[in-house]
Structures are given as structure tokens and as C-alpha cells.
């Protein structure tokens, strides 16, 4: 689906990949509605949109609140006329600790945002998308959704759930006008650790610079939108995601041990 002239709803548009997706969609001629729980971050995104602000609407929304999410499609349609696509980008990570040291409330929070929030948005918008001549849903999983990452096991489980939910949904919609793609980002330069409440800005910077080579959020957005327009089944973002996708399929134990060795310094 060519995004020019289409209306796309993007979750988590206040920062990181979400913000870059919003700005790129606007640049490519789309109308965009975006949400975040952080009103100030949304305002900053709107300011960065510059001359494209007339095609952007922002909505302060907690995607884990199903009743609130249900009201959003009509608001978007009233604002932009139609809705043609959804990019479920919003997500959080967990504390960098093992399951034995992770509190149940932290596991539940990750699942509520990453999986149930995505399901809420999908369920709310799907009836409207099915009425369009063509439509597209893009769901963001993670490299951690197909590869075990010690210290991010609950996060990985939430993203694995996103993977299978998205693939099942795509199969269910094969004979419809709605297409579904699932995204697997590798290490992306965003402030997700800070936004997730699991690190200070200084800790996040030290962790990222010490261990992992990251792809810019802007480049990640380009890859995602390109994959959306080409109706890709899986959209692998970054060379690390591509390499580990291959390795985890042909040598899963070796792939798991490789990631284990990379995570040891973070887990202590």
C-alpha cells in the first residue's frame, strides 16, 4: 500500500521510532494520527512536523485502556475522513534482570503494553480497515521475539506473542483487502530504556555505547515504511536482526549462546 494520501494511525509517536515513523509518513504525503501517554512528547513531535502539521493529529492515550482505545477510530475518522492503516509501534522493555528477580507486576506491565495494548488497537481499528479499498496493519515485534535474550525474557515473550498474533491475523485476512506485516527491529538507537522506566538517561547511554552497535531510529523508520509499502511478511530492521534471524533458524542453540555471552556484562 502506497502511504501517500492515506491516513495512518501510529502508536507511540512521542519519541524514538514512533516519532520517526510519523515524520516520515508526513514527508511521504500521508495523513497521520498518533498517540502517546506523554503529552509533552507528542507536542514535540508536532513541532518537528513543521509545515506538515496540518496533516497530523495527536492523541494522548494509554493503549492498555481498551474502552479508551475503542473511541479512537471514530475520532481519527472525524479528523481525517478515513483510516487506512495502523502501525502498532508503542512498546516498553523490562528491567535488565533475570525472571527470578523480576516482580510479577513488572511482567504484567510489559505484557499489558506490548501485547494487550497492540491487540486493543488492532481490534478497535480492524472493522474500519476492512471497509477500505486497501489497508495495512504493521505490528512491531522484536529480534527478541524469535531469539532468547537473558534479562529480557518477559519482554521477549510479549514480542513472541506479537509475532504469532500478527502472523495468524495475516493468514485470517488473506482473502480481504487488509494486509499485515510484522517488524523485527534489532538494536535501534532510541530512548526506550528511559521511557520504560528501567534506566536513567546516563545509564541508558552507557549501556548502549558499551555493548551494541545501533541503527538510527530514522533509518529504522525508512525500512519499516518501505516494507509496509511492499507488503512484506517479515520486516527485519538492521543487520543484527537479519543475521540472528538466519542463525536462530539454522543453529538455534548457537544463536542463544551467542546472545547469552553478549548479555552477561549487563546481568552481572
Image: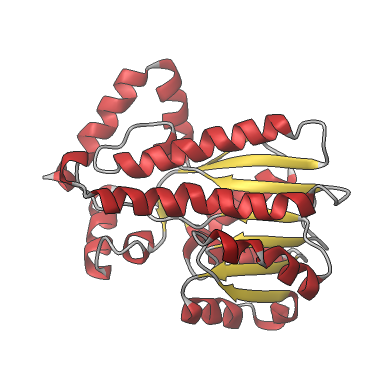
The foreground one among 132 and 89 is 132
Q: Residue furthest left?
A: 268
Residue 65 position, x and y percent, is 51, 62
Coloring basis for residues: secondary structure
In the depicted structure, whether residue 38 falls above or below residue 182: below
Q: Image check: 194 left or right of 77? A: left
The foreground one among 29 and 31 is 31
Viewer can see residue 211:
yes
Total marks placed: 0
- Look at 62% across and 31% down and name the residue there: 168
Residue 157 position, x and y percent, is 39, 38
Q: Quadrant of residue 27?
A: bottom right
Q: Residue furthest right?
A: 133
Viewer can see residue 21:
no
The foreground one among 212 and 199 is 199
Residue 106 position, x and y percent, is 28, 53
Residue 225 position, x and y percent, is 66, 52
- Look at 51% across and 54% down and name the residue there: 117
Q: Image check: 80 left or right of 189? A: right
In the depicted structure, whether residue 171 falls above or below residue 59: above
Quarter of the image that includes the C terminus:
top left
Q: Residue furthest front?
A: 67
- Look at 15% across and 45% down and name the residue there: 101
Amino acid at each position: 500500500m502506497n502511504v501517500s494520501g492515506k491516513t495512518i494511525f501510529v502508536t507511540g509517536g512521542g519519541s524514538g521510532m514512533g516519532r520517526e515513523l510519523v515524520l516520515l509518513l508526513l514527508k511521504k504525503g500521508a495523513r497521520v494520527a498518533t498517540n502517546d501517554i506523554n503529552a509533552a512528547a507528542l507536542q514535540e513531535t508536532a513541532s518537528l512536523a513543521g509545515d506538515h502539521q496540518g496533516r497530523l493529529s495527536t492523541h494522548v492515550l494509554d493503549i492498555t485502556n481498551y474502552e479508551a482505545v475503542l473511541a479512537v477510530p471514530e475520532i481519527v475518522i472525524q479528523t481525517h475522513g478515513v483510516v487506512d492503516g495502523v502501525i502498532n509501534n508503542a512498546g516498553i522493555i523490562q528491567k535488565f534482570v533475570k525472571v527470578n528477580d523480576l516482580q510479577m507486576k513488572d511482567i504484567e506491565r510489559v505484557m499489558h503494553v506490548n501485547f494487550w495494548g497492540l491487540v486493543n488497537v488492532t481490534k478497535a481499528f480492524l472493522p474500519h480497515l476492512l471497509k477500505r479499498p486497501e489497508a495495512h496493519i504493521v505490528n512491531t515485534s522484536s529480534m527478541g521475539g524469535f531469539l532468547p535474550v537473558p534479562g529480557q525474557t518477559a519482554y521477549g515473550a510479549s514480542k513472541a506473542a506479537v509475532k504469532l498474533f500478527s502472523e495468524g491475523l495475516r493468514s485470517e485476512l488473506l482473502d480481504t483487502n487488509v494486509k499485515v506485516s510484522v517488524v523485527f527491529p534489532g538494536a535501534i538507537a532510541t530512548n526506550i530504556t528511559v521511557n520504560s522506566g528501567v534506566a536513567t538517561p546516563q545509564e541508558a547511554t552507557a549501556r548502549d555505547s558499551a555493548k551494541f552497535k545501533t541503527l538510527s531510529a530514522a533509518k529504522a523508520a525508512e525500512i519499516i515504511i518501505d516494507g509496509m509499502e511492499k507488503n512484506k511478511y517479515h520486516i527485519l530492521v538492521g543487520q543484527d536482526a537479519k543475521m540472528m534471524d538466519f542463525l536462530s533458524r539454522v543453529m538455534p542453540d548457537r544463536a542463544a549462546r551467542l546472545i547469552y555471552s553478549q548479555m552477561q556484562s549487563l546481568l552481572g
